[in-house]
Image (tube, rainbow, N blue to C red):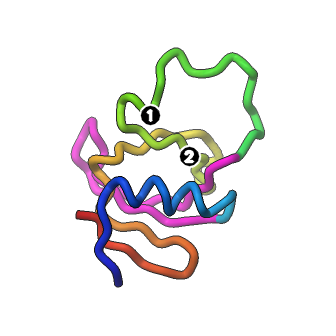
């Protein structure tokens, strides 16, 4: 297991190039710890309208939740663990 920073999380997730990854994070609204299997780069169900705000400015990571079959936003501040590309990372 490796220890990484939040900035490195963005880099690792973008390098997954659409592959599945697991992320453990605290929800911003309730503080509940949650696990999610997700992907980035999914374009299914996109209407072309776009977001009304810039997710990156709010430190949010837009992903597609593979279990719930929908788009979700993960707070980068709340990420505690990431599993991607066969590696497990602890986020500090």
Residue 29 lies within the magenta run? yes
Residue for point 41% across, 67% down: 82
Which callout, 2 or 1, points at the residue further toward the start of the chain?
Answer: 1
Instruction: Identify the image quadrant of residue 59.
Output: top left
User: Do residues under tags 2 and 1 come within 8 Å of each other at their CB atoms?
Assistant: no
Q: Can you identify the residue that label 2 sits on?
A: 63
Instruction: Identify the image quadrant of residue 6.
Output: bottom left
Residue 2 lies within the magenta run? no
Instruction: Identify the image quadrant of residue 39.
Output: bottom right
With 2 as the anchor, is 21 left or right in this view?
right
**1 or 38: nearer the eye?**
1
Looking at the rendering, in which quadrant would you find the N terminus? Answer: bottom left
Cα–Cα span, label 2 and label 1: 12 Å
**Height in image: 66 above or below 27?**
below
Q: Residue 15: horizontal and vertical position, in percent?
A: 59, 61
Residue for point 74% across, 21% down: 48
Q: Nearer the viewer, mark 2 or mark 1?
A: 1
Range of magenta residues: 20-41
Tell me the SS state at disc 1: loop
**27 or 49: nearer the eye?**
49
Looking at the rendering, in which quadrant would you find the C terminus? Answer: bottom left
- Which labelled disc corresponds to residue 56? 1
Residue for point 36% across, 57% down: 34
């Amino acid at each position: 297991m490796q220890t990484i920073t939040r900035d490195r999380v963005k880099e690792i997730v973008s390098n997954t190039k659409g592959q599945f990854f697991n992320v453990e994070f605290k929800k911003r609204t309730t503080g509940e710890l949650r696990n999610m299997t997700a992907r980035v780069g999914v374009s299914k169900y996109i209407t072309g309208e776009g977001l009304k705000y810039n997710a990156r400015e709010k430190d949010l990571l837009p992903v597609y939740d593979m279990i719930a079959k929908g788009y979700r936003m993960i707070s980068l501040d709340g990420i505690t663990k990431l599993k991607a590309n066969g590696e497990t990372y602890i986020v500090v």
